[in-house]
Amino acid sequence: MAQSGMTAEDYKRALTNEINVVMNLLRDTDNEDVDVMDQLDDFVRECGDFLDQKDVDGDATPQHVKERISKLVSITLPKCVVMLLERSVFEDQFRYRVFQFFHSMIRLELRVFSINPERATDSYAIIHKMFNKKQKFYKQEPEAGMWEEKDCMYAKSDQENQVLIDVINVFGEESGFDVILHTLSLPDVSIRVMNKCIRPVWETMDLLRAEFIIEWVPEVLNHVMARMLNLTDQQLKETPRKAINKAFNYNTHLLAWLTYRLHENEIEDVYDEKWEKFRLEFALKCFRSQTLEKRLNAVSDIGELVSAAHLKDHSTGKRDQDHPVTKYLTYGMVTHWILDNKIIEQIFGTHLHPELVKRSDKLLYAIRHHKALTQDMLELIWNSSLDKQETLVEAIYRVIAQISVDFRKDEVEFLLSKIKLIPAKKFDKRIIELTYELCARSPVETSTLGLEILWDIGLNEKIAPDVSSEAKRCLIAALKPVKKTLGHTYLVRCIEMWQRGDRVVTAMSLFMDLLGPTGNQFIIADLRSQFDLIGIFLKEFSDYARGETTLIGLQTRLKLLRFLTETSALTLEVENADLLWECLVKNAKDSTRRDLGFKYFQVEAPRSFPRFESIQKHLLVDKWPQLDLTSMTDGGFECLESYFWSVNCDDRKVEGSNHTNYTILDFNLNGLDILWTIALEAKNIAVATKAEKLVNDLYNRLHKNLRKERGRLHEEYLARITKYLDEDTNAHLNIVERAVLMLTNFIQAMEKVPVKMTDTVYPSKTTTVYYYPGTSTKSVVHNLMDELKIPRTAHVTFQKSGSDSFHNYIFPHFFSKKEKLDFLYKVQQSPLVQYDSDDEEEDIDVNTLEVTCPSQLISKNFQLIDRLFQLLDRMNWQTMDSKDRPIGNAIWKLIESVPTNPEIHHAIHGFQFPEGMTWEKFLDWKSSFKLLYFLNLMEDIIESKTSASIKWCQLLEENGGLRRIYEIFSTFRDNCNGACVAPLLGILGHFLLTDQGLLNENSSMLSYCLIPQLISHLMILLQMAVQNSTRQIASPADQRGQFVVKLGSQLLVACLQSRPQNLQRFFQDSNFVDLFELILTRTPNTKIQRDFANQLMSLVRMQETPPGVKLPRIFILDLTASILPKITENFYNTENFFALMVTIIRFCEKDKDPQFWRGLFDQVWNLMKTHRIFEDSKSTREDHVLVGWMALLRKIFIIQNQFKNDSEMPMMLVWCFKNLLFQVPTKEFHGKLAPPMCKMKSSRNTAFRLLGEMCNGHVENLKLLTRLITNVHIYGLAHNQWNSSPSDNVRSSVGYVGLKNMGCTCYMNSLIQQLFMLPRFRKGVLSADCSPNDAGNIVFQFQRLFTHLQESQKRFFNPEYFVRQNKDMDGEPINVTQQMDVDEYFNMFCERLENFLKGKPEEKLLENTWSGKLTNQLICRGCPHRSERDDPFSTISLDIKNKSNILEALDLYVKGEMLEGTNAYHCEKCNTKRDTLTRSCIKTLPNTLIIHLKRFDFDYDAMRKLKLNDFCSFPLELDMEPYTTVGLSRKDAANAENQDEISEEIDQQELDRRKDIEEAIKTRNPNYYKYNLAGILVHRGHSESGHYYSYIKERITVDHKEPQWIEFNDKHVSVFDPKDIPHECFGGTEEIRKTDPQTRQTRWETVEKSRNAYMLFYERVEFIPPPKPAVPAVPAAHKLSPSQKFRIAARVIFYAAKIRRIVKKRRETEYYLCVSVPAKFYEEVWEFNDGFLQSLNVDKPYFEFVETVMKEYQPEKCEDWDGKEDETIQFATLFFMTVLAHSKTQEILEDFVQRLITYYSFHVPTCKWLCQTIIKERNFKQLLLACPSQKVRSSCCQLLLVVLKQLLKFERESLAQYEVEEDEYMFNSDDEPMDIDEILATSMSRSLSLNLLETIIQWDGYVEDELYYYDGYFAFFFEFAQFGDVEIEYLEKKNTLQRLIDFFLLDDSKNGKKLSKRKRDKKAEEGQSTDHHLIALISLLYQETQVST
């Protein structure tokens, strides 16, 4: 006990010490010291005295005393109770002492509880633990005579539980049961407290006396029932469902025991009746609550009572715990109670809700069972579904379907009459299914009404197709039993509808469905006797084709035609073919319909027409040419191709088994002209390509009899092509392009291909022969033999490379297609075997084939080649390089591919010009393409470098050709980067330059080529070439530009080197300065920069110049220095500029004085300091300018080492360290362009190299740098974090944060991301006022989540707390392992959010964001009256089944339905029935329109949920005007007739409505109806499981960039290409590759796409703010004077300008927030961000830098014990311990640690520092025992050993004199580890090395916890023992051997044997056992012990 007079702190410390002593003693299971119990009694007595004193003194007790008592009562004493209860072995004397303590605790806890029951519920929790018979304390049998059995009024005597009995009796004697009754009787006691009171007794009812139960339990029940019935509405609302359930469970258990005891004592039981009546009353109370949750629970409870009562009435006598029965209430009593309290009327009336309806099924069953379901009640249920939301209607229909099983005839008729009144538009599958069931259960006369309903709906073409299809299916199923009587009637009605043209498509479909898939011959024969089916069909089809046709209409008619011809004897006549061709093909309205006709004539017609072969030829020859062949589609060409093969095979013009293996017998083919037209004129590129391939292939598949005519056919081919190359190029550019490409492909297909032959006997002997496609095998073999001079009688075998089998004599037919082949051959002297029949043909001369080759024919046709040059001249070079129009490039490639024309060849090679031809005419620059062609030929001759080419060059000079080329070059100005300049420079370079790149002084060109003029001309050409090369990625223009720059600069440098006197003028020429700056600082093409810089280096290396001329390197250095100030961060490609300058500085080190270098240094330093941040953390762009500044500074430091001694050097070092590398973004300054300046790997490496050079050779700078790193970064990683790589967790490069999936919460994540990307909604949510007390509120966590999504710098955020606050309909947290429908969750979340925002300024947030209004209209025909009702909406749900796009779904949404006939609407104003249009349309639209695509359906046949993966597209831009009241009114007005008459009859209400619409048209923004797609929420999977993710378009962009689409897929956030939206979101089908697991063969298979859009988010083109409330006018007294107005206006202007400046600055630095966030969350996020951003500096460049610094550091040796520590070694050690050892990057680990060991081996003071650090800090213990890296653990062990070895040099004597204290030995795991204060306290009496050893020994308890990683620990002691005898003696004194053996045998382990053994066994199974050091240490110590013994 603490002494009086102590301070508050001393008081607390004394209490802590006392508690720790007691707790430690209790933990020792062997300790049974009675003093401990005395101390506990003192604690209890002290608490009791405090409570007594409090009653007297009030609150005068000091605060620290209150805190002590509170800790004792709430923490310490309950823990002690629990610890004692969990102990199993006691001596009876001590056990009795514990029982007395429990007695005192019961008294104390009851005292505490009686003071304040609501706040002291933990007291009963302790009593509940003491009443638990499963506690180990009660398991031990007491000693005889110690615990006497004695009776008491509370618990009965029980030898087995006597101790517990005594505890219960003590509780009763202390008035515990009375306290419970008193607490239950309190008027305001909560249900939670009631449960706490009852719970202890609930588990011990079997131990209580029967008399006590009979007396006490009824009072408990009465109090509970009374309290629960007296709960106020607010109390009931605040009571959770779980608490109510517990109350029922506890009291039901008490009631069961009470009933049992009453029956046992033969006492009348009235409490079952009271309890069951109470349950009904309480359910009624909950049902009348205003809270939906409570109403739902009430209906569920009533349903349970109904089920229990039903089981009571039908019970078999057996009890079923899973299905309880009532004891008093009967099935009828509960039913009458439901009727009396009008539960059903309220469920389907005032309390209408889908969940209530779903849970009412049991109630309705009961009422139906007792025949109490009246027609009024049935009508109420039915009427409750009218004009209600879809989910509610679905629930009501489902309940009706469930209770309709046993309906009477009148009830069936009543329901069918109600169904008949439903508008057709509102029919769905549930109503259809209900109608069918009613028909199936009723007689024929009653089913007729149902059949008529199904007939009307099935044939209604205005409703959803899936509904009508379901109606037809049910109609067919219902007609099966009565088909003979009614089925024939419906078939006749279908045929009559064909004749009338009434809903023909539907009638035809129903006709086929009624007959079945195989038809019925007898029924069809009967129908044929009444109707001419084919005649009726053809007449209707002809009439239909002349009008507007639809695709579904054509498909249905063709399906019926196939049905009639396949299922009966009906056939078509030949004359019908032309009619069908005209209807289906020739007169088709579009390509889709025409393709349908083509498919019919290709697939179906051959089976429908007799003698179809003649019809095919007729159609191909006569009908096909009449079509528009330019519009041919894939389907049409497929049909044409089948006709082409079929007709020509029938005419014996083609021979072959299939389309891939055929031979042309006669080239006068039917349809060939059609193929040519399609190939060259078709608009569809794919179709034209197919036709082109077919035509070209026809010329390559000639029969052997036609091969001799190959030349003629090729000439005809060229003639056809030439016809299309007419002069009107611009008008037929596409045709010309197609013709050129077709000709090019034809030439490639017909060119010869090399075949490599290798002798298998002599592999070095290879021969190449050539073959032409179509050449026979025999010809190739003979050609090879002739080439090898082998007799044709020889035996030659061949093998294709890679093949396993040899082919004797005969090549396989590899020659039908163009491919390079590689063969092996072997010659054997044996007779020649005859060839197969395929090769028995006459050899064709290869030379003949070569002459007839198309390329040879073209090369001889000079007019055709000239025509191609003319086409090129009419185009420009841009057309040549354009990707959209590659025609010029194709023509040029064609010219290059053919052999050189003979005339041109003789002119160039032999200088034999035609008469009158000169060099000027031959090399005419006006025809640039022809000039290019000739120059390329000349350049090819020059580059061959043969003797003939050398002679040709001499002739070129002599004949004046070279002079002509130079003239063209000297006058050439335009298209300098074109193809002509490159060969010009190449030819001139050959004659002007030597092989070494110098000027050729012997060239004859120097006689007329003036060097100064050549230099000037070259500079102009270079400048123009660079300006025209604008792309980094090589294109043809850029490649030519690169060649021009490379060769031009080479010529330029060669001229300057040979004529150095021109250097002065050259460097002073402004053209060169501009060229230098243009190439090296502004050109994006780095290759051009590199080539130019390399050529300038030749000038830099010049050592001599004429007198008075400076060296070129000095000129260039001065020039680069003058350009430096002009360079800004906008110069992207400056790396070559700076590289050149750095290199020049190396050459000019001695050419410039120190003053120059000082000026250059200051200039670069100032430029770098003022350089703004350019590198973006979200992209990969690198700041080349900053890298250049740093490289220059580093180079200057290298050559001017004295600059490191400047006084400003520390400041410069600090600036570079902080601004370049280690400054991190802050909450005030963050964004893409936040610090540091260097973010890319290259720039960071350069910055580190700069810092390294600043410290190189300068100790003070190095020390400053190490201090900076230590202070700023060294504490970035946690001590228990391993393999850390913070860069893997950085925020996505697109700038957004993902969300962690908590299990199946992807639906929540995808929706939250959609909501977050709504800036105005986000602002509204974050602006809502939420106090910290609302932390359990979902909006509070929603704000927190939004803040993290906006401000976090991490890759993803964990929404755990937000998920916890999401509750289901019962108020329970949602199950994160179950997926939820995202649309359902959205509605639930909106409801909770809206409830929270009520009464707040943001109350209208949801309404202003995505809420609109729907109008349900009833528009009467024949009178001007209409009825309208408005309903709000958040989402528009669209039926998409059988809808190709959402526009069709929207049309259906607002289409409406006519109520007419018996369904006519009763107009109240006219008091008569009118035909009425009922429809829903949109009245007002939100700024964000959310569309829900209903992709989930229910299959009532299979009774399972389905997902619709149908294709449904949606537009990027949506106009909603046609679907609004305004749009529909405009449409109605345009379609109305007799408007004047109607306008006279309209009433005032209609006038007001029209006025409102006109006002809306006038006042609404034109963009009110215009929307852009901004978000897509996708579902991937099937109906039972799947995954949600989102595609979202940015609303806010940075730097005015185009908004991107982003994919949010849980943690994954990336850019999404909107071009992929159709593929990823529209649904439908796709082709996938599947592999057969057995055959391993792959095939393509068509499957449904399981990923498709589920919700669409459309954003209005222009945000329209909500209307603002009217602002009251300012009274006259408050009007401002002119002077006041002037002052206010001036201040407004001033602040507006200031705001503009701030906004501009923030935008420039990207330091702004899209939405401001609450400060409490902002601080929280940036607290996390700061540490995370600091850790990002732990990267590979940083490690390499530290390694470099340490490599260069050479510390001085220090063996002085009192010397000074080395700061650099300290820094390196801390770097290893806190960064490197925890990092994922450990490449430098081993070398770095070895260097540290070397440093410590000769620096004793730093060893002392590390020793003290290890003693004080826990980090080193974690590294040695917890790190999973074996390298790290081994490194730590080595460091410890080297430090200890150095210390023992001074302290070995103290180690030898060490004496162990009493009870002290090594690895004492039973004792608590020594506290750090204890170690420091004993350090004065021990040496430093001993303290270190004692600290390491204290880690032994940690070893047993980390059995995986103890190898380093025992390796340390093993190596330590090998130091010497003193060390071994020390270990012996610590009793090491015995403890090691115990540890190895897992004896006395603190964590238990099983756990330790399991860990070690698992490690051994993995083959990674680490026991070898432990075993080695035991062996060593054992041997030493034996020796000493």
Image (spheres, rainbow, N blue to C red):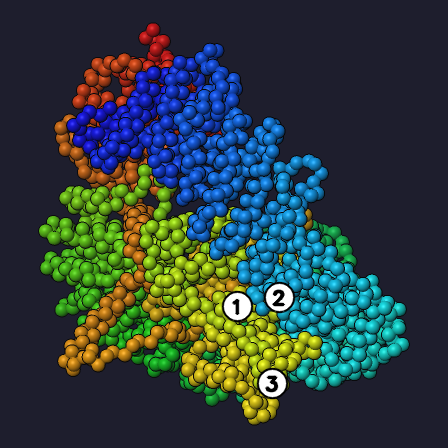
Viewer-proximal residue among 1452 and 1771: 1452
Find disc 3 in the rendering and name its residue. Answer: 1423
Residue type at mark 2 is Asn
The local crowd at label 2, few if under 14, some if 14 to 19, many if 20 or more residues have their Cα within 10 Å, is: some
Find disc 2 in the rendering and name its residue. Answer: 383
Q: Position of residue 955 (x, y in %)?
A: 42, 76
**Disc 1 to disc 3: CB gap under 8 Å:** no
Residue 1805 is left or right of residue 1865, and the answer is left
The local crowd at label 1, few if under 14, some if 14 to 19, many if 20 or more residues have their Cα within 10 Å, is: some
Quarter of the picture holding the C terminus? top left
**Residues at marks 1 and 2, CA–CA distance in whole angstroms:** 24 Å
Residue closest to the far bottom: 1540
Find disc 1 in the rendering and name its residue. Answer: 1436
Instruction: In the rendered structure, find residue 937 and report the number of the disc placed on it.
Output: none
The local crowd at label 3, few if under 14, some if 14 to 19, many if 20 or more residues have their Cα within 10 Å, is: some
Residue 984 is left or right of residue 142, and the answer is left
**Disc 1 to disc 2: CB gap under 8 Å:** no
**Residues at marks 2 and 3, CA–CA distance in whole angstroms:** 26 Å
Residue type at mark 1 is Ile
Dot 2 or dot 3: first in sequence order is: 2
Indicate the secondary structure of the residue bearing disc 3: loop
Indicate the secondary structure of the residue bearing disc 1: strand
Indicate the secondary structure of the residue bearing disc 2: helix
Residue type at mark 3 is Cys
Q: Position of residue 1421 (x, y in %)?
A: 62, 83
Locate residue 1123: give its quadrant: bottom left
